[in-house]
Every structure is written in C-alpha cells, then in structure tokens.
Image (cartoon, grey):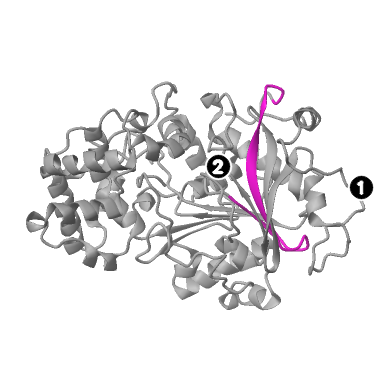
Amino acid sequence: MRKALRGFLSLAVLIGTVSATGASAGAATAAEPSANQGSGAAGSSESSSEDIKDRILAIPGMSLIEEKPYPGYRFFVLNYTQPVDHRHPSKGTFQQRITLLHKDTSRPTVFFTSGYNVSTNPSRSEPTQIIDGNQVSLEYRFFTPSRPAPADWSKLDIWQAASDQHRVFKALKKIYSKNWLTTGGSKGGMTATYFERFYPKDMDGVVAYVAPNDVVNKEDSAYDRFLANVGTKECRDKLGGVQREALIRRAPLEKKYKEYAAANGLTFNTVGSLDRAYEAVVMDYVWAFWQYSLVADCADIPADAKNATDQAIWDSIDGISGFSAYADQGLGTYTPYYYQAGTQLGSPDIKQPWLGNLSRYGYQPPRNFVPRSIPMKFQPSVMRDVDNWVKHNAKRMMYVYGQNDPWGAEPFRLGHGTRDSYVYTVPGGNHGSKVSGLVADEKAKATAAILRWAGVAPAAVEADPAKAKPLAKFDARLDQRNGEVERGEGTLRP
C-alpha cells in the first residue's frame, strides 16, 4: 500500500514518566478521583454528581484541548502523554491527540482509529451507532501534531502504535467499564487488526472495514487480476483510454501542470521532479476511480478519450487522482503512512498493461514519497506474522470489504482455529463499504454479532439475529452514509 515484539510495560515506571512530563502548556488537568466517585454527565443515567470531564482529566498525563457541544453527548478533544518508545518509557514522551464522544459510562465503548489524523469534530463510526455507545478516537503516532520532537522514525511501527492504543484503553477502562470494541476503515481497519494481534485480551470484538492485507509485498498479481475484471468492460475501457491519453499528451498537460504548480505554490523536492509527480498522479487514476467511485460514475468519464480536449483529460485525472497529491505539500501530511508502507505494511506494484510503454517510471514505491533524510528498510516478516495470526487465532473479529474496491484484492482471510469471526463483502461496494450496505440477511447477522460482542443485544435479537438493527437512530451530522468515502490527496493510500 502506498498510499516481535511484545514487551511488558511497567505501569509504575510509565506513570512516573507521564507525571514528570505533565500536560501541554495551557491545558486543563484535574486531580485523581477517589475509588468511589462516579462518572457524572448532564442528562445521563449516571448516578454520581461528579462531572465526566473531571474524571477524564484525573487520568495522569491527560489534558484538555477543548470541549465542543453536541446534543445528547459530551465531546472532548484531548492530549495524552505517551512514551516515544514503549519498551523504554523513560526515554522521552510526546503528546497524542484523542477525542472522546461521551454518552454514558453505563454504555459500551468503541475505540476508533483511522490510522491517520484524528478529526476534531464530533462523529460516530458505524459500530458506535449500532451499539449506541461512547467513542474514543485516537490519532496515529507521527501524524502531526502527534509527533515526537525530534522524530525518531524507527519508533513508528505497528507494535508501538498498538501499544499507544493499549495504554489509552487501560487508562479509560477504569471509567468506561462496559464492553469495548475496536474499529476503523482502511488503514484504520489494519490498525484495529494489529491492535488485536498484539493485545488480544483488551477488546471484546473487532470490526475492521476494507482492511488491506499485503502479505507478500513482492507478489501483487492479485491486484492486476482484480483491475482486469472489476466493474464492466465498457467502464474499464473508458478509464484506460483517459489514462493513456494523459501519458500520450504529457507535454501539453505538463505545461498546464507547471502553471498549476506555480499558481498554487507546489514544489516537488521529495518525488524529484514535476514529471515524476505528474506520472504518479496519472498512474493512480484507474485505481483511484474504483477506490472512491461506483460503476454508475462511469457516465462521467470521457467516452472518446482520443478526441477529448486536453482540458477534459486534465479535469478527469484531477477530479479522481488530484494533481496536488505528489507535490511536497500533498505528501507532507502523509509521510508517516508512506514510511510505514515502505517499512512494514507493503504497497501495490500494479502492471496496468493497457498503458504499453507510455510509463517512464513504473509504479513508484513508497521510498519515492518520503524525504531521503528519513532512512527506510522493509521488514518482510511483519505482515506475514499478522496474517498468520488472524488466520489461526481470530476471535470475535469481523471484516467488511467492497466488491469493487481494489484494496480488497488482498483481504484478511479466516482459517482453522478462528472463532465467532466473519468476512463479508458489499455487492458493488467501494472503499466506503459498511455493514449497512450488505445484503439483508448478512447485514442482520453482522449487526447482531456487533450487538452481542458489545453486551447490548436485546433478548429478541439473541433469539433471532434477523431482528438486529442499530440501537441509535441515524444522525446525518454524526454518521457517514453507506458507500461514502472521504477523498484525500495522494489517492493510492488505504
């Protein structure tokens, strides 16, 4: 994807380190609550008069950035002091952003991560809506501002990130004592999987959406087979035609790109040249279409690419791939992702034979998208370990994929030894596929499992899973609709 290990951590040493570091400047903190104090929340069923904010800020190392109002919830944006290296917690700390959508401590909690930056606006993942619970969302380490200074990039790996999540869970479990699920989509689904692999006793269930599983980085033929058959031939031909024209017309379109870059202050130091950046955007075009779009969206693709204007070709490529993606300004935000793709996660190297000899650079590797000052070395055993663990040890784990999503070409699979675990596919779905998009019987079965894992399945659902439905009503401001997927620069990222 462009886009071991376990150490025992002394809680006493870690708390001492966190306490010594303290909260960030200007942040609010509070004292440790006594054991018999409650949670407290206006309008909730919680019995204690103590405010939930006070309990949260009583956690050593937790500080408040801001609280935002939302009907029926309390929403907090927080910083939490984490060790840079969980194996050596005395060797420095950093501030990691967290958000908390608080409903009631008597409800279960969902631990969400996108695998990237955290949104500081209230939102609710699908499992949170299904179980009508609280939601803790964590920013992935090394995504600004949750980055140690100075940044030792060797401390950005999946075990360290899972250990971040483990510490947050241990700290908040004392307040939110009911069942916990972990979830995330794409790189967030991968993150949820890695968390379960390294800390299998923490969560009561895992719901991972569209999570890629690039087990052997050098063997990517599954992606090629997928792209050769996805959708309809008519749609594939239209997409391939536009992509070919974008490379055939490289000279006039790169002139336009140079003007675009100058107007928008774009530079290309990391990737090396405007030409390399241009081709990288074009090479992403077909993949990005299927990642973000549906078959019906093919109607918007120029049907006769050879006779289309330069502007029509530009607009189609820019609208789907985004010409700012591989400029320094587009890459900078995602340096942690490309670093991980080039050191542990793996990345697709697709052939795209319909382009013939038009490509100068081929599918460029993650190393090209990370500043050369940051050393990288790929570790081929890491994904094999996770894949093997899931196949033989998965317990209460659910994977949801989209039929037309390229990232699902190499999915997680369940094998002998797994228990109460499932893999589902949304018909015609893209990278925004959710449980709500499954066929009716699978949707009910998946929803029932999520309710059961969270410990809130109604008696009627326990007796008949076909009756399962989300416990909370859909909220257009909080909940993303099925099939919607957030588009971002640098399209070939999970």
Q: Report which quarter residue 402 is drawn in.
A: bottom left
Q: Does the magenta stretch include residue 199?
A: no
* Residue 87 visible from this viewpoint: yes
User: Disc 1 marks which amino acid?
Assistant: Ser
Q: Position of residue 366 (x, y in %)?
A: 36, 33
User: Disc 2 marks which amino acid?
Assistant: Tyr
Give me the C-alpha separation between circle 1 and circle 2: 34 Å
The structure residue drawn at horizontal position 61% and vertical position 77%, both measured from the top left corner, is 464
Total numbered labels: 2
Chain part drawn in magenta:
89-112
Disc nearer the start of the sequence (1/2): 1
Few, some or many C-alpha atoms within 10 Å of disc 2 (few <14, some 14-19, many ≥20)? many
Identify the mark at residue 34; answer none if there is no mark: 1
**Pick the front one: 387 or 95:** 95
Decide: marks 1, 2 in contact (CB < 8 A)? no
Q: Mark 2 points at which residue?
A: 194
The structure residue drawn at horizontal position 66% and vertical position 26%, both measured from the top left corner, is 87
